[in-house]
Image (spheres, rainbow, N blue to C red):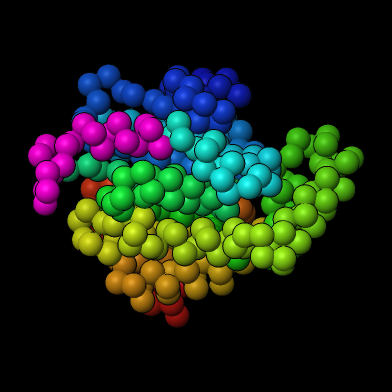
Amino acid sequence: MASAKAGVLDPVFTKLGPRMSLYTPPGHAPGQLVVLCTWLGAAPKHINKYILSHRTIAPHSRILLVQSDVSILTTSYPAQRKAIKPAVQAVWAVIGECGQGNNHWTAPQPKILIHTFSNGGTNSATQILLELGEERGKPLPVVGIMCDSGPAKGAYWKSYHSMLLSMPKGLAKTVGPLVVQFILVVLFTSIAIGRYDKPEDLWRRTLLDAKFVTGTTRKEGRICYMFSKADDHVDWHDIAEHADMARSKGWEVAEIDFEGTLHCNHFTNNAERYSDMMQRLWKGVGLIDKPRAQL
């Protein structure tokens, strides 16, 4: 991993479509899949450490990588659903390896983990769940969902800074502010006139919707939130509120507060603690849910 060149994913992924690619390890296990949905503008050199961790924890699992950028969030919902189809087909293929009778799996049960980052990754996961749910007519069975730095409610200025951060440095310093302001004005105006639901509301609702996602080790599902109170792009209270929503629906929940870490950068100085939670989700080990007062 350390020798991977900047801008190059390690290992080599097969391209499925724009910003979507799939890694299949030698001797992959049928039905095993990690869906890795990254934050806006995430560079391969930053994505690689999560890929390596997943390969270590789940060496026989495929990894579906869905990257995101600002242009995705500014397109219509129908356009996003159409664009995400290659990723949905990859999930379909994994489910198909297991086979399903009327009331049971005819081969090994699917083992699927969803790992999202910020609202960009949450949006990608949401579009996959919505499109798959419509095509399949059943919720996607997952061993767990890991939410890094999200999902947030998407206040105007929080969205502004997140979008600006995802742009190339040169562009962000010149025309970036004007471009982002224009995008957000159009987006928030469309929401205000009822053109479609506020994206953040859709994301936060869909992740916990039994029509689109269900657990394999327990019906309600398992979810872990990784966040920091020092994150200046996402308000940690938004994440805590979503965790409470999950609990109210019967989900097994864990909240991990990393002290002093920045947006989507909790892994760097906390690799062991972070990887432990990834492993707990993948292997079905009980999550550690501290009372809110201890966070």
How many numbered dots are placed on residues in this image? Answer: 0
Question: Relative to 194, is 128 on the left or the right?
Answer: left
> In the image shown, does 252 or 131 lie closer to the viewer?
131
Locate residue 53, reporting x and y percent. 39, 37
Residue drawn at 12 percent across, 48 percent down: 102
Q: Residue lying farthest bottom?
A: 293
Locate residue 18, reporting x and y percent. 57, 28
**Is 105 included in the stretch rendered in magenta?**
yes
Residue drawn at 22 percent across, 42 percent down: 110
**Is 286 included in the stretch rendered in magenta?**
no
> In the image shown, does 258 or 198 lie closer to the viewer?
198
Question: Relative to 111, is 84 on the left or the right?
Answer: right
**Is residue 167 visible to us here?**
yes
Locate residue 289, reporting x and y percent. 34, 69
- Classify 156 as above or below 73: below
Residue drawn at 27 percent across, 64 percent down: 220
> In the image shown, does 192 or 239 lie closer to the viewer?
192
**Is residue 54 visible to us here?**
no
Question: Relative to 72, is 52 on the left or the right?
Answer: left
Report the magenta residues as a range.
88-107
Q: Quadrant of residue 219?
A: bottom left
Residue drawn at 83 percent across, 34 percent down: 170
Locate residue 47, reporting x and y percent. 52, 35
